[in-house]
Image: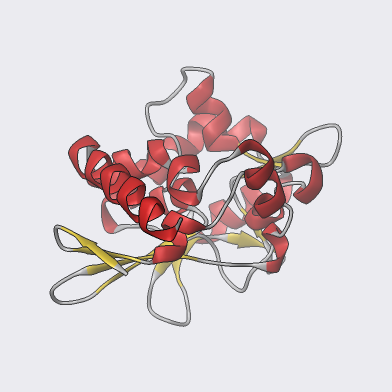
Amino acid sequence: MIQIEDKIVSLDVLEQFFCCDLAACKGCCCVEGDAGAPVAMDEIAQLEAVVPIVWDRLSDKAKKVIDEYGPVYVDADGEFVTSIVDGKDCVFTCYDADGTCLCAIEQAFRAGETDFSKPVSCHLYPIRLKKYDTFTAVNYHKWFLCEAAAPCGKKHGIKVYQFLKEPLIRKFGEEWYDNLCVVAEEWEKTEK
């Protein structure tokens, strides 16, 4: 583990290769799991505001869930998460012609329809954050659903922290990310 400011970063974030391979996984991280994606308190209003923007991209079942329960609920652990459809799909999922699961919010963001790209927990995946009293743990979450991402990352020479440059900067700032890169480069030298 390494520390940058009040963040304790798992060495897996620096050492492991990772690059999403949507052709292989079909976006199943937005479908599988026991709850929706974690949502920060300050993201709830953003998710509520984006619903009308993405409404036409959502399934009828997702629309019904949002109408009845809203886009966010509190899970069994007492955490805010995105609402889900049939115990699996995030309400913001949509599918392309090949059956690949996509994020309706991210599609709207890329089309310039909103300045909110998606919850930061989704953007950061496979990194998961855990806040403690004096620090935040930055961990690489290994999930069998993402097993194609490791060889894809190795093929392209991309480590977890490199793949997640944009969301790490979004969450912690550019200076923090630059420091992470310096530490990663130094760490790599010691491993050779």
| Of residues 125 and 92, the one drawn nearer to the viewer in this rendering | 125
Of all residues, the one furthest to the top in this rendering is 112
Q: Position of residue 88 (x, y in %)?
A: 68, 64
Q: Is residue 182 left or right of residue 70?
A: left
Which color scheme does this rendered protein use?
secondary structure
Q: Position of residue 106 (x, y in %)?
A: 53, 33
- Tell me what residue is drawn at x 42 percent, y 25 percent: 114
| Of residues 34 and 87, the one drawn nearer to the viewer in this rendering | 34
- Tell me what residue is drawn at x 50 percent, y 33 percent: 52
In which quadrant of the rendered view does residue 143 lie? bottom right
125 is higher (above) or lower (below) than 118: below
10 is higher (above) or lower (below) than 61: below
In which quadrant of the rendered view does residue 84 lie? bottom right
* Quadrant where the N terminus is found in the figure: bottom left
Task: Tell how many labels.
Answer: 0
Of all residues, the one furthest to the right in this rendering is 98
Q: Is residue 181 left or right of residue 108?
A: left
Q: Is residue 115 left or right of residue 141?
A: left
- Tell me what residue is drawn at x 61 percent, y 57 percent: 65
